Image (cartoon, grey):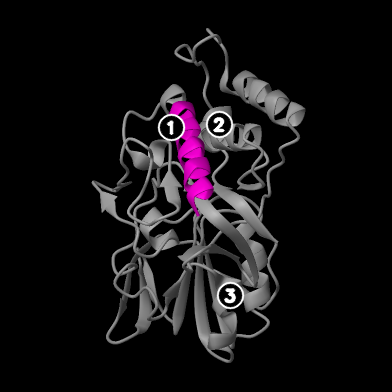
Amino acid sequence: MRYDIAIVGSGPAGLSAAINARIRNKNIILFGSADFSNKLIKAPKVNNYLGFYDITGTELKAQFEKHMNVMDIGVTTERINNIYAMGDYFALMVNEKMYEAKSVIIATGMEYTKPLKGEEEFLGRGVGYCATCDAPLYKGKVVTIIGYNKDAEEEANYVSELTEKLYYVPMYNGNYNLRNNIETIKDRPLEIQGEDRVSKVILRNGELTTDGVFVLKDSVAPNQLVPGLAMENEHIKVDLNMKTNIQGCFAAGDCTGKPYQYMRAAGQGQVAALSAVSYLDLI
């Protein structure tokens, strides 16, 4: 199935884009979190969202959810790892699965986790962001997974079935649901090193010799998510119509720049949806 518009991100920008695209009778798919936005639900008070004075983030999220339910818009909670422009459509990769859409709206918010030293340098040369995608390349080898959330544990368990040795470096606290053959390393990764390819991970209190490193974050930087996407000051470069440098690809919300405000994000989501609809009418 090829959707008219795929929206990646379920904060105010993504939800606004989804609502406005649905109003225009477009066939959409929205990728994101069941909670919509961690930033939103953690907000103690929101006083600058028109019509909702002195409201908590959780209460505002409930209003968003009511609106989405009335319009019969659901959230697909699968994580998009890569988006490729294929000419007349976009391929959105979810591990071994692929979705297709004629246009894309990026509304992933701002990536707050800075890359490790060496992470970007060795991307594609031993560093990856989708463990289940690339695991077969490391059959019988040593792999290190740096996991930023509980979802990374599932990928680690799968990869451990293929590797000779798997190190798991959790960047969060809690109980870990990992297979017995996985060694958990509770230390802080500082740098990824190697020559032509990755050979080690430098930790605060030691180092790991490894053939590959998977960095599993909540989200990856937009230019890593969409190869060739133009950036400006660590944000996606867009024009006033939320168009990026890639035809058919639009962006909205915090990922396009400051100020990081819900009202701004919602407005940009609407503009991005209208621009995507106009684009679809021309192709």
Identity, as a three-letter code, of the amino acid under mark 2: Ser
Q: Calculate the distance from the C-alpha at mark 3 to the C-alpha at mark 2.
A: 31 Å
Dot 1 crowding, Cα within 10 Å, few <14, some 14–19, many 20+:
many
Dot 3 crowding, Cα within 10 Å, few <14, some 14–19, many 20+:
some
Tell which circle, 2 or 1, labels the residue nearer the N-terminal end.
2
Is residue 273 a member of the stretch shown in magenta? yes
Instruction: Report helix, strand or loop for mark 2.
Output: helix
Instruction: Report helix, strand or loop for mark 1.
Output: helix
Instruction: Report helix, strand or loop for mark 3.
Output: helix
Q: Which residue is mark 2?
A: 16
The residue sitting at the left extreme is 233
Query: 39 or 280: which is nearer to us?
Result: 280
Query: 102 or 162: which is nearer to us?
Result: 102
Query: 73 or 102: which is nearer to us?
Result: 102
Q: Quadrant location of the N terminus?
A: bottom right
Identity, as a three-letter code, of the amino acid under mark 1: Gln
**Residue segment shown in magenta:** 265-283
Above or below for 215 versus 27: below
Q: Which mark is residue 167?
A: none
Residue at horizontal 45 percent and vertical 74 percent from the top = 213
Q: Which mark is residue 268?
A: 1
Residue at horizontal 49 percent and vertical 74 percent from the top = 144
- Image coordinates of residue 56 in percent, x first then y, are 57, 17
Identity, as a three-letter code, of the amino acid under mark 3: Cys
User: Is the C-beta separation of discs 1 and 3 under 8 Å?
Assistant: no
Q: Is residue 97 left or right of residue 45?
A: right
Residue at horizontal 39 percent and vertical 50 percent from the top = 113
Q: Calculate the distance from the C-alpha at mark 1 to the C-alpha at mark 3.
A: 33 Å
Q: Which residue is mark 3?
A: 133
